[in-house]
Image (tube, rainbow, N blue to C red):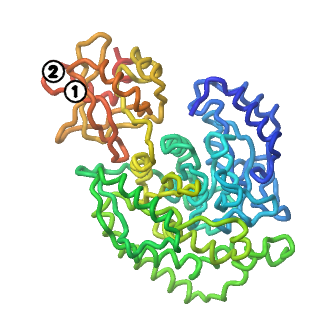
Amino acid sequence: MKTPNPADRIRETFRKIRETGPQPIWIHVRDEADVLAELEALDPALPLYGVPFAVKDNIDVAGIPTTAACPAFAYTPTETAPAVRRLQDAGALLIGKTNMDQFATGLVGTRTPYGICSSVFNPDYLSGGSSSGSAVAVASGLVAFALGTDTAGSGRVPAAFNGIVGLKPTRGLLSTRGVVPACRSLDCVSIFAKTTDEALTVLDIAAGHDPHDPWSRPFPTLAGRSGPVRIGIPHEDQLEFFGDDEAARIFAEGAARFEAFETVRVDISEFLEAARLLYGGAWVAERDHAFGAFLREHPEAVDPTVFRIVTGAPPRSAVDAFSGFYRLQELRKQTEPIWESIDALLLPTTPTIYRIVDVINDPITLNSRLGTYTNFVNLLDLAAIAFPGGLRRDGLPAGLTLVGPAFHDHRLATLAGFGIPDRQTIPLAVVGAHLTGQPLNGQLTERGATLLRTTTTSPDYRLHALDTVPPKPGLVRVPDGGVAIEVEVWDMPVDQFGSFVALIPPPLGIGSIQVADGSWVKGFICEPAPLEAAPDISHFGGWRNYRASL
């Protein structure tokens, strides 16, 4: 994600903004000189050094107005949202704040006074919402990544309509403090990026337990699961595309790309029922709680559709609310067994895509259809990632989504990489002499490999010091008595992978390694025989610690 010339990239971003005008993508753009001055003060060793990014304008940044796409609502915060601050502390440079469906109410991107964003593939078609500007800023190449929010699909639908990745993390992994709420119990900060690996990099930096956010949750250590990866595919008669044969074709082709794994047909009827609770149940009252009073006090300043959705819903009693909570809990219990038979559920991100003019003429019905496969995810406390499924014959993009249990974000993102057409890179875990700063790291960088993240193996490995020049370790998976060993995961271009493997001498080789989140990546393994004479250095937790001890 880093660039060799970040100042040039920042200047080019601002040049493009001046050339096209800030709107409809941006609500607020920072001063170019301020951003370049900020770059000058950064440590080049920071993981996101000089990387430009954007945030949706319902997320606070100190000194910049937060509007939630409603000028009458605007206020200027004195504190930056923790999720944004963590990225800035890692060296990322904020370019500005982006357009959105007002008060994050919509999946279309048309409910805003700042101009309507369109898909980068066709100006007549929706950009998707509510995080419209963030998705378009990434898809247009203005920024490397952007933050949105996702309550009902707002971090996934815009990704589908712009051919990028939209990571909807497990609720609570990224702090929602400093975010204008839509449904506080469901909201989460989402991530837009060009690739799944870049989205994971941002997730790992932005995530963190926030003791001041009542909805924040720490990332637990998950036990790894052995056996083949199992992908759930809905029964064909449960898939609805509203007559869009091209969307159906793209999904079928996407499902075929996962046939390298074990595929399982699953019943999604209870997921779909949960999705209907979001706007057909008590959760509309949660939006009313968040900003309904403002809407009623300033009706002339509010998008008519947003006003209608929030204030026009039938009155609901506490009894109605508890009935909805009870039914949702029943659906959670009824859907939990599915995750014992599959690792991830593959779905269309949306059933179809609509023209902007059609949504303006029918704003409620068409918006509702777009949430068919997204609305249930936060209600059922699941994680999800949307990724490009390919282009339709009319040149429009179609998206796919993988859904899985809470805290399986890394596994989902890794699997999603296999579902993107024309996959061009391979994640590769290194454990010793190829780590950053070690003598063989150049074998990676000279092939165009980029560092994705630093993590550990699952706690099933032992590390031994081999007698080689330069010094290298041997990593071996053991049936018991293993520990977690530090690794770096690099993104290796497919066309360079063969030449890299050819450099590896015995007893080392390339196999599959399970990392901390339970997913598997290619990585260095060692034949067991030479390890009998090689000191066991597992207690150091990694090669760097061992070398530092000498």
* The N terminus sits in image quarter: top right
Q: Where is residue 539? Give x, y as percent.
A: 28, 29
Q: Is residue 492 left or right of residue 469?
A: right
Q: Is residue 73 left or right of residue 485?
A: right
Identify the residue position indicated by label 1 in the image. Answer: 526
The secondary structure type at the circle numbered 1 is: strand
Q: Amino acid at mark 2?
A: Pro
Q: Is residue 288 above or below residue 259?
A: below
Q: Is residue 358 above or below residue 12?
A: below
Q: Which residue is painted at 41% across and 19% down in the image?
A: 443
Question: Which residue is outermost to the front?
Answer: 393
Q: Where is residue 396? Give x, y as percent.
A: 59, 56
Asked if residue 178 can be seen in this view, the reply is: no
Q: Is residue 247 left or right of residue 411?
A: right
The secondary structure type at the circle numbered 2 is: helix
Asked if residue 493 can be seen in this view, the reply is: yes
What's the CA distance linking mark 2 and mark 1? 8 Å
* The C terminus sits in image quarter: top left
Q: Which residue is painted at 53% across and 50% down in the image?
A: 209
Q: Which label sits on residue 135?
A: none
Q: Is residue 518 above or below residue 394?
A: above
Mark 2: few/some/many CA within 10 Å (<14, 14-19, 20+): some
Q: Which residue is painted at 77% across and 55% down in the image?
A: 66
Name the image quarter holding residue 7. Answer: top right
Identify the residue position indicated by label 2 in the image. Answer: 530
Q: Nearer the viewer, residue 379 or 227?
A: 227
Name the image quarter holding residue 303. Answer: bottom right
Q: Where is residue 18? Give x, y as percent.
A: 83, 40
Q: Where is residue 527? Give x, y as percent.
A: 18, 26
For the residues bearing labels 2 and 1, Cβ distance under 8 angstroms = yes
Q: Is residue 70 left or right of residue 413?
A: right
Q: Amino acid at mark 1?
A: Cys
